[in-house]
Image (cartoon, rainbow, N blue to C red):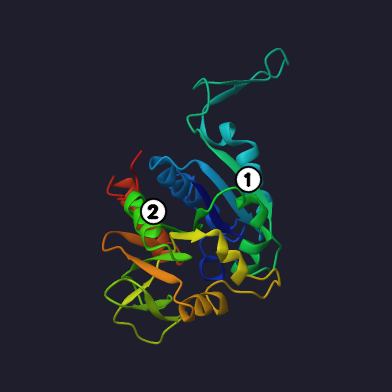
Amino acid sequence: MKVGILCGGFGTRIRDVADSIPKPMIPIGGYPILWHIMKYYAGWEHNEFILMLGYKGDIIRNFFMNYRSHTTDFTVDLSGKIPISYHNGKSSENWTVTLVETGMKSMTGARIKIAEKYFSGEDNFMLTYGDGVGDINIGKLLEFHKRHGKILTVTGVRPPGRFGELQCSEGGRVTEFNEKPQTTGGRISGGFFVCRKEIFNYLDKDESAVFEQEPMKKLVADGEMMVFRHDGFWQPMDTAREYQLLNQMYDQKKAPWVIW
């Protein structure tokens, strides 16, 4: 199944860590957090990625255009006989990566709508943000989504209350969505969405269209949004403290999302 990753935001809250690169390219253990997210999905055998670019998208393009030189050892022969020799034979990733320019100032809803044509050919696709990792059971997430038949499944997690809070029924149907609640006692949106293709009927190419606002609220009103409850690990990288935490976990080999 195709996996869309939102990679275009300005990442203003983490500029003190890296102002010269987009947030999805901030490294954990030497590799961009975006790479970690893609490796996780690939570990569940989902290898077709659509990256929705915006702010400093050229840096993400450069990374994938020169993927082997960024991720493996190589020798440069300046005589020109064999310009570059890579020392691991071939890339270990069986991925296809489509990089889509969705605009510098576009919000999340607009980015998804602009990339619509690249999701064609399938009834469902996955979607997430380029700045959060977790140990979500992707297999069970997809089973849940296909079983309930609604348009959108959002993974509900339990971290700090500054994210979008989900209120839901016992059966899992979302009954209320608040993008940034003042206080929270329930689950919050952790990304790791699964979408039916009908999601595009709720989206707009206007750059001000925010996926987490009117589209989600309309989906809730229509009874078309369900939550997949995840009680395991989930962590965004939104601040310098979170950047340090994720790197510490990776360095100590205690990173729950590393399944490769």
Q: Which mark is residue 142?
A: 2
Q: Residue at x 66, y 43 (%)?
A: 62
Q: Say which element carries label 1.
A: strand
- Of badges 1 and 2, the one in the foreground is 2
Mark 1, residue position: 98
From the top left corner, tell me how far across and down residue 227 is, in percent. Answer: 36, 68
Q: Residue at x 54, y 54 (%)?
A: 4
From the top left corner, tell me how far across and down residue 224 is, in percent. Answer: 46, 72
Examine the rendering and report whether any part of residue 29 can be seen. Answer: no
Q: Residue at x 57, y 31 (%)?
A: 68
Q: Which mark is residue 217?
A: none
In this figure, what is the number of numbered marks?
2
Q: Say which element carries label 2.
A: helix
From the top left corner, tell me how far across and down residue 149 is, in percent. Answer: 42, 62
The C terminus lies in quadrant: top left
From the top left corner, tell me how far across and down residue 71 is, in percent. Answer: 52, 35
Left or right: residue 58 compared with residue 127: right
Amino acid bearing label 1: Thr
Give the class, few, some or many, for how many residues have Cα within 10 Å of label 2's Cα (few <14, many ≥20). some
Q: Is residue 257 above or below residue 91?
A: below
Left or right: residue 157 compared with residue 4: left
Amino acid bearing label 2: Leu
In this rendered view, identify the residue nearer to me: 240 or 190: 190
Give the class, few, some or many, for how many residues have Cα within 10 Å of label 1's Cα (few <14, many ≥20). some
Q: Point out the tag, 1 or 2, that comes first from the N-terminus.
A: 1
